Amino acid sequence: MPAFLSRQRWIVPSFRKHMKMTSPQKRNRNDGGKGGPPQDQPHILDRSPPFDLAAEMGVLGSLILNPDLTNDLTLVLRADDFYDDANRKLYAAMIGLFEAGRKMDVTLLVNELKAAGDFELVGGAAYLAKLANSVPNAAHAIYYAEIVRTKATLRRLIDASTSILKDAYDETFDAKELVSQAEQRIFQIQDERNANSAAPVSEVLRTAMNRIDMRMQGHQLNTGVMTHFTDFDQMTGGLHDGELIILAARPAMGKTAFAMNIAEQVAMKDNAPTLFVSLEMAAVELVDRLLCSVAKVNGSRLRVGTISQDDQKRLISSAAKIATSPLYIDDAPSRTVSEIAAVARRITQQELRKTGGRKLGLIVIDYLQLIEPDNPKDPRQEQVAKIARRLKMLAREQHVPILCLSQLNRQSEESKDHKPKLSHLRESGAIEQDADVVMFVHREGYYHRGEDAEQYAGQAEIIIAKQRNGPVGDVELIWEKDFTRFLNKAPERHEEFNSYSDFSTPGGY
């Protein structure tokens, strides 16, 4: 075999010593109890990794025939995407000439290879000639490159999976930390594949203009979900896919109730699959609140068992409606962002398997400060920064809005009007930076007692303090404490919103 075609066997990191089977495993295998694979089937780790030498040669031959393709190929391939060592060295030499500002030709390539001592190693002039003659049409270079890149991605997945398996057999690793590291390894491969996703502005403009045209014609764009709080939706256009929305408040202000009201509307009115991740309350407690809200039953009476027969009838009727909605509640007391992502993906797969199934419409998380960090040893500010960033990445990955609740520090209660500001967010810098929308629940009546409280009874505000793609301002709502729910103050559009962009009616932009 010519030197340029010889190659080292692709080595999988050794971990077989970690895979010794126990006696029950030996007894359950159809292999004579030896713990190895069946005689007619090679062990999976002994199989050759994915590669395509013809595609690799197609890329190199195309570059020799048409060096002008170099720039396009650098956006798709890296030298380490090549499986064959000789091909890898050749591609690296070609890219080296390009990056040095020298137009690649065979003479310069030969000189470059000789200077590096690689000319004979790659097969010399004979192999270069073979490459040039192996390509019928250099126009297929990108197609060849995609094949090479796909095979490289599969090899990286095998390598990452092997390392994960090796670590899993090492009992010194913490299981949660191992899960987090495993996901990061896989995500890193995906990030590498997405690194060259830049699109010309002409393509993006075409999409943007089509969206504008559809809005002008009064079409509802499927870019997220509506909350059905009229003034809020007119001011924000609803909750948009890929956005991280932070909802913050001091304890007992009603942030969980408002989030649950939104989840209720999205799941029951729009029939959009909704995931509510509750790290603070048990699922049954949330469902109690949901029942009270939908059935208009006093929550305090429900807890002590003093509701009327009419209340019971409304509860039964409401329970039947809720049961048919695509609302999911995850009440595990401890979750990392990775685990939340896994739950979201599983629900999406379940829903898409149904007839006419839909992807997740909304994820609600209650609340950010209770999400477990990937590395508990990191400083708290860094932990929160990573969590906020991962949530934003999850929103974009799943093409879903994430409504994440957050705590406020005590400084918000020290101001004269008690109204929260962005600076009152706990670990505010990191949260504010990654959030597309930051809003606060405020009820002035909470700070007043006795007769003084009467003038504030039932009053509530949603303060939109940050909106990346829209105005900021306050939205007035009605708070029904007995039923743990918020209501629209007025069903019709207010005049003061005429200056705001309406994303759901003709004329929005």
Image (cartoon, grey):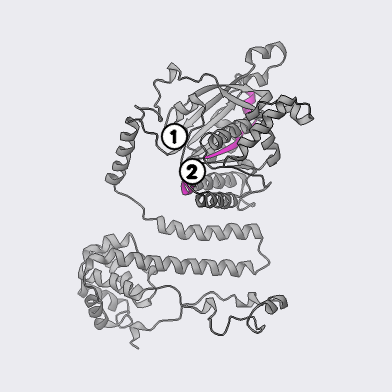
The x, y position of residue 329, in whole percent, is 63, 43
Question: Looking at this view, is 418 or 199 the one in front?
Answer: 199
Magenta stretch: residue 71 in it?
no
Q: Secondary structure at mark 2?
A: loop
Amino acid type of the residue tagged 1 in the rendering: Arg
Q: Quadrant of the C terminus?
A: top left
Give the Cα separation between the discs numbered 1 and 2.
17 Å
- Specify start and end residues of the magenta stretch as a single range: 396-414
Residue tagged 1: 468
Q: Quadrant of the N terminus?
A: bottom left
Please indicate whether residue 206 sits to the left or right of residue 14 in the image.
left
Magenta stretch: residue 413 in it?
yes
Q: Is residue 471 above or below residue 348?
A: above
* Visible residue check, residue 408: no
Please indicate whether residue 92 sits to the left or right of residue 180 in the image.
left
Please indicate whether residue 358 sits to the left or right of residue 207 in the image.
right
Which residue is rendered at x = 63% and y = 12% of the image?
Answer: 455
The x, y position of residue 94, in whole percent, is 28, 69
Q: Is residue 389 above or below residue 62?
A: above
Question: Looking at this view, is 124 or 153 the one in front?
Answer: 153
| Residue 38 picture quarter | bottom right
Residue tagged 2: 400
- How packed mark 2 is, by other alpha carbons closer than 10 Å (few <14, some 14-19, many 20 or more), is many
